[in-house]
Structures are given as structure tokens and as C-alpha cells.
Amino acid sequence: MPLDPAAETVVTGFRNTPEFAHGIVRDIRIRWALEEIGRPYRTELYDAMKPRADEYLQWQPFGQVPAFADGKVRLFESGAILLYLGEQDERLLPAAGQRRWDTTAWLIAALNSVEPMLMQIVTLDIFYVGKPWAADARPSAVALAEQRLARLADALGDKDWLAGRFTIADIAMVTVLRNLRHTEIVAGFPAVAAYQARGEARPAFSQALADQIAGLKQGEPA
């Protein structure tokens, strides 16, 4: 239900990307969070292949998605937007205490410690596929990613979620892990794979994914 063309809350996304990016463009993080709390929002979708206008660059200086506005603030960067939403709803971010800071730390870890390592593999496999130097670089990139995944598995232990209960940290981490869906790397870490599957099984994620893909299909040739 949260996708509502009359809503004041706005999330930007793309209306066309290569198929490999379907379901991993980062506006899915914000869509998912809004679905979790039942907050209506509308989208502004842009052509991924065209330069963004100066007006958009004043909102999102790098021309990326998502950007966010709700009549009170205008934000860019998915991590910042998740924190903002969490401040408004304890279902996403505990109000105080250790769990609040655990959530914050794991959110930042997903984006700073895990995602860069995983994105090296995406870059090699998708953007430089077939290049001899990319094939040579891949084993070391995989080793670094596996090191991070091993640490994540250790931290998870037998927990369902990173900070005790589901939070914005899990939204960030699960969407980061999805970047490797074209590989079997995550499957090598059963605790991490099960954790990712739990996140993807949430109805709010399923709805966010369906809505993002529906938006991306708007740009497909008729």
C-alpha cells in the first residue's frame, strides 16, 4: 500500500537500468523501510542513461538514486535516509541504549566495510567481463569479500538479525549481500545465506522489490 501517487514523501529511482541491476538499485532500501512501517510514498523516476538536470544535482550532488524528501527535509544517500526514517519509527531503529548504537554501527558497517568489498566483484564481473586483467584480479577480490563474509557470519552466530531484532541495519546489509546474487559466494557462508533469505522473505521486501521492478519496466521498449 505505501506506494501512493498523492503521498508527500518522495523517493527517487530509475525507470530503466540493465537487467542485472533490477532489484539492487539502492532506492530499494528506502522502499523497503517505508513498507515495513506502512508509510505512503511516491516515486520520481529518472532515465538512468541520461545526465541529471542541475535541479536534481542540487538535491543529490552525484546524480544518483535514491534522493528523498518529505516536506520537512531533503536528503541523499541511502544510509542517511534510513537513519532519518529510523529516528521517526522505533520499528526501524531502537530509541536508545546499546541496541540503538549496535544498529547504527551495523548500518555503517554494511555500507563501509562490506559493500565496497562486494562491489569490487560486481565491477569485475559485470563492467569488465572478458578483460584479461579482470580475470587476474578476481581471485584477490573474492578473497577480500570472503574475509568480510566470514566476519559477518561470526558476528551473526545464531542470531536472526544483527542488532537483536530487525532494524535498518538489516535492510542495509541484506541489500548489500544481494549484489553477489550472480555468484555462489554468499552460499559458501550458510549463516549469511540464511540471514539474507530471512530478509528477502519479509513481505515488505517483496513489495518493495515488486514496485521497484515495475518502475524499471516503464522504460522498456513497447
Image: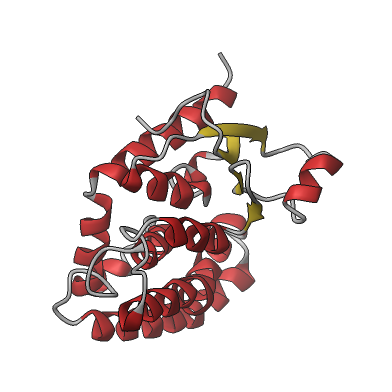
Quarter of the C terminus within the rendering: top right
For residue 33, above or below residue 93: above
For residue 148, above or below residue 182: below
Residue 16 appears in the picture as rendered: no
Residue nearest the viewer, comparing 151 with 78: 78
Tell me what residue is drawn at x 46 percent, y 83 percent: 144
Residue nearest the viewer, comparing 149 with 82: 82
Query: Quadrant location of residue 95?
Result: bottom left
Q: Position of residue 10 (x, y in %)?
A: 57, 38
Horizontal arrangement in the rendering, residue 58 relative to residue 141 (left or right) = right
For residue 122, above or below residue 31: below
Residue nearest the viewer, comparing 174 with 7: 7
Query: Quadrant location of residue 135?
Result: bottom right
Residue 194 appears in the picture as rendered: yes
Colour logic: secondary structure
For residue 11, above or below residue 117: above
Tell me what residue is drawn at x 39 percent, y 47 percent: 32
